[in-house]
Image (spheres, coloured by chain):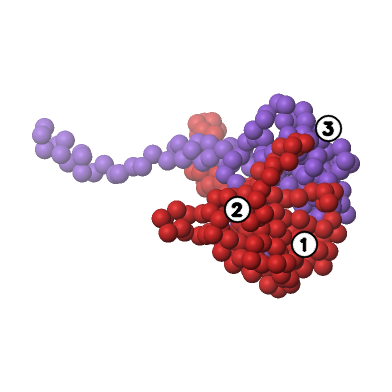
Chain colours: A red, B purple
């Protein structure tokens, strides 16, 4: 009698907790996943050409960065003013002022010493990129024409 | 007859089918496993990106090439070490294959600008005009 009863009991794998285990693994993957998102400052490099494009000097704001990170800024009305690394936001003020004055013609030229820190150049570029003015007829202007002058050029 | 069927309906216990939850969950697991990309680059390269307030998110996912310059001035393009004067030889075939390629420059903040300048010149030579300076928010 006992033997017969044993034969009748069926093998059974409990699957009720499968879902729990699976969701536990999901939560692990969800919390450890890092979606790589690129971020940075966009730039468009110019074509390498022999012909020089002439820009009127009054439309140019030229910024020079020395190895210590100090700047010399030249523009019409500003005759070579010195800016220390603590006063970089001064760049933004002047470029915005010039942007209102010169509209879309404005070109910002950035000449960095080859011994200057990369962070110094990025900080100045940052200030130029932050420039945003609204003209009287309601257009938003940005300093779109930025030229990174190669260090080899004199 | 009528009465019997009503009674039977009342005694029935409500039942939510749970047999397929495991299948759904495993499907989600597979999705996350397939889409997860483990970052390996940060292990071997010591990089501190410069900080900038005007940092933007780059929305494109495809058509991207990476250039890394670490704190000792070594240049890597997509996981291989390249002399900085020969960046263009590596970039030219990439640009020929895909002219819309955006090059992301991951450069250590303390690098002297001379090195960056050489690489920028090489990029101009290989006609890789669309670039992005990788930065961190802040500054």
The span from disc 1 to disc 2 (Cα, nearest Å) is 20 Å
Query: Does B120 sit left or right of B58 as displayed?
Result: right
Decide which of A86, B3 is in the foreground and name it. Answer: A86
Q: Quadrant of residue A68?
A: bottom right
Residue at the image position 73 percent from the left and 41 percent from the top? A52
Residue at the image position 73 percent from the left and 47 percent from the top? B105
Query: Does A144 sit left or right of B106 as displayed?
Result: left
From the image, state whether disc 3 or disc 1 is nearer to you.
1
**Is A102 drawn above or below residue A9 in the view shown?**
below
Mark 2 surroundings within 10 Å by alpha-carbon count, few (fewer than 14), some (14 through 19), many (20 or more): many
Q: Chain of mark 3?
A: B
Residue that mark 3 sits on: B89
Residue that mark 1 sits on: A65
Decide which of A64, A5 is in the foreground and name it. Answer: A64
Q: Which part of the image, by quadrant, shows the N terminus of chain B?
A: top left
**Do tags 2 and 3 sit on the same chain?**
no
Residue at the image position 54 percent from the left and 31 percent from the top? A7
Pinpoint residue A50: horizontal percent, then vertical percent.
77, 36
Pinpoint residue B21: horizontal percent, then vertical percent.
46, 40
Q: Chain of mark 2?
A: A
Q: Earlier in the sequence, mark 1 or mark 2?
A: 1
The span from disc 3 to disc 1 (Cα, nearest Å) is 30 Å
Label 3: which secondary element? helix
Query: Does A99 sit left or right of B87 as displayed?
Result: left
Residue that mark 2 sits on: A106
């Amino acid at each position: 009698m006992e033997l017969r009863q044993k034969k009748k009991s069926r093998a059974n794998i409990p699957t009720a907790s499968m879902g729990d285990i699976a969701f536990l693994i999901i939560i692990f993957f969800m919390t450890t996943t890092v979606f790589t998102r690129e971020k940075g400052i966009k730039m468009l490099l110019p074509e390498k050409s022999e012909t020089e494009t002439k820009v009127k000097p009054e439309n140019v704001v030229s910024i020079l960065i020395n190895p210590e990170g100090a700047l010399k800024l030249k523009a019409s009305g500003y005759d070579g003013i010195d800016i220390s690394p603590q006063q970089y936001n001064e760049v933004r003020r002047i470029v915005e002022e010039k942007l209102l004055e010169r509209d879309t013609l404005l070109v910002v030229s950035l000449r960095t010493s080859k011994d200057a820190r990369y962070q110094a150049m990025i900080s100045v570029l940052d200030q130029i990129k932050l420039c945003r003015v609204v003209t009287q007829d309601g257009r938003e202007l940005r300093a779109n024409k930025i030229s990174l002058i190669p260090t080899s050029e004199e | 007859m009528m009465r019997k069927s009503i009674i039977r309906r009342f005694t029935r216990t409500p039942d939510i089918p749970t047999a397929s939850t495991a299948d759904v969950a495993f499907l989600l697991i597979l999705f996350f496993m397939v889409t997860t990309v483990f970052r390996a680059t940060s292990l071997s390269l010591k990089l501190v990106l410069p900080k900038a307030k005007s940092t933007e998110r780059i929305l494109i996912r495809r058509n991207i090439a990476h250039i890394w310059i670490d704190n000792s001035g070594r240049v890597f393009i997509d996981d291989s070490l390249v002399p900085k004067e020969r960046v263009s030889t590596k970039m030219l075939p990439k640009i020929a294959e895909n002219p819309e390629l955006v090059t992301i420059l991951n450069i250590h903040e303390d690098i002297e600008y001379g090195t960056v300048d050489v690489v920028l010149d090489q990029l101009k030579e290989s006609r890789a005009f669309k670039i992005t300076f990788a930065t961190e928010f802040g500054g």
